[in-house]
Amino acid sequence: NRTFTMIKPDAVKNGHIGAIINDITQGGFKIIALKYIGLTKETAGEFYAVHKERPFYADLVKFMSSGPIVA
């Protein structure tokens, strides 16, 4: 089995990457790939397209493209 996780911009900005990765590995998960990237509004919009009709969609896209993420 595989799963996807994303460390959001606020956690990256606040320096929580190491602690979150530690929690993931301590939980028994094996990290096979890691990227430090910035999402454009377009990419974030595509990723969260399932929520497009929800009232929080615009704020979600804005937040997720506000800074780097780790995925």
Image (cartoon, rainbow, N blue to C red):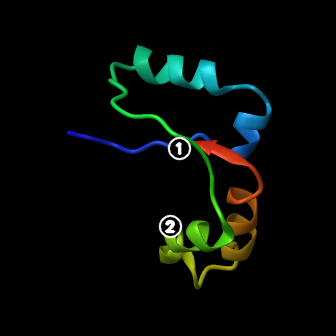
- Vertical order, 69 against 17 (above or below): below
Element type at marker 1? loop
Q: Residues within 10 Å of mark 1 (few under 14, many from 20)?
A: few
Q: Eyeballing the image, is 62 above or below 26?
A: below
Q: Residue furthest bottom?
A: 53
Q: Are marks 2 and 1 in contact (CB under 8 Å)?
A: no
Q: Earlier in the sequence, mark 2 or mark 1?
A: 1
* In front of the other: 51 or 11: 11
* Residue ID for mark 2: 47
- Residue 39, percent from left and from top: 63, 58
| Amino acid type, callout 1 | Met
Percent coordinates x, y for residue 68 in the rendering: 69, 46
Tell me: residue 39, above or below residue 14.
Answer: below
Q: Amino acid at mark 2?
A: Phe
Q: Nearer the viewer, residue 71 or 37?
A: 37
Position in image of residue 13 (x %, y %) = 78, 36
Residue drawn 52% across and 73% down? 46
Disc 2 to disc 1, how far (Cα)?
A: 12 Å
Name which quarter of the figure residue 3 lies in: top left
**Element under label 2?**
helix
Residue occupying image coordinates x 33% and y 30%: 32
Above or below: residue 59 compared with residue 29: below
Seen at 75% across and 26% down, the residue is 15
Residue beneath label 1, please? 6
Q: Residue at x 71, y 36 (%)?
A: 11
